Amino acid sequence: MTKHITRAEAIEALRTAFARKLDSETSMCKYAADHGVFCRGFERFGDGDLRRRFRWIYDKDRTMTREQLEELANRWQLARQEVGGLPTACDVQQREHDSCNGWSDFSDEDLSKFYAEVFKLEVNIA
């Protein structure tokens, strides 16, 4: 039997589960990329797209490698979380919309898939 939950409940459960796995040096974007989970974080963007999304960082030094850009973007996400008092980069981007749109990037179907991935339980979001 499939469990029925609201979109807000799914987001809160995912936020809580991921926040427990993060530390002071790892944003959700880095964690998702490093572990191949959720939206896949920085890894979901090709090199050009990543440079475009973090242009204000990349434009400071156009010789930086992708790895260097990801590290600076990770630090930036963590700083924005700290300043905003927010638990994850998804919450930061929900407000700021500069590298993505945070939780708004995900359909209910996406969230259901992520929920099943994390909790090994299928849900219907209604």
Image (spheres, helix red, strand yellow):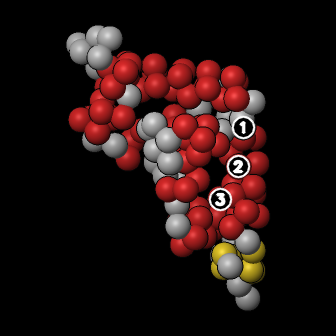
Where residue 6 appears, as percent x and y from the top left, is 73, 71
Compared across the picture, whether 12 is left or right of 62 comes to right
Q: Quadrant of residue 109?
A: bottom right
Task: Please give the label number shown on residue 15.
Answer: 2
Which amino acid type is marked by label 3? Val
Where residue 83 appears, as percent x and y from the top left, is 69, 23
Which amino acid type is marked by label 2? Arg
Residue shown at the point (76%, 48%) measured from the top left? 16
Circles 1, 2 touching at the beta carbon (< 8 Å): yes
Depth check, mark 3 against mark 1: the one in front is 1
Residue shown at the point (24%, 35%) measured from the top left? 48
Which one is nearer the viewer's eye here, 124 or 31? 124
Q: Residues within 10 Å of mark 1 (few under 14, many from 20)?
A: some
Which SS class for mark 2? helix
Q: Earlier in the sequence, mark 1 or mark 2?
A: 2
Which one is nearer the viewer's eye here, 40 or 102? 102
Compared across the picture, whether 56 is left or right of 90 comes to left
Q: Earlier in the sequence, mark 3 or mark 1?
A: 1
Q: Which residue is mark 3?
A: 118
Compared across the picture, whether 39 is left or right of 86 comes to left
Q: Residues within 10 Å of mark 3 (few under 14, many from 20)?
A: some
Q: Whole-Å distance between the Cαs marked 1 and 2?
A: 7 Å
Which one is nearer the viewer's eye here, 7 or 40? 7
Using the rendered image of the protein, determine whether residue 13 is visible from the camera's viewpoint: yes
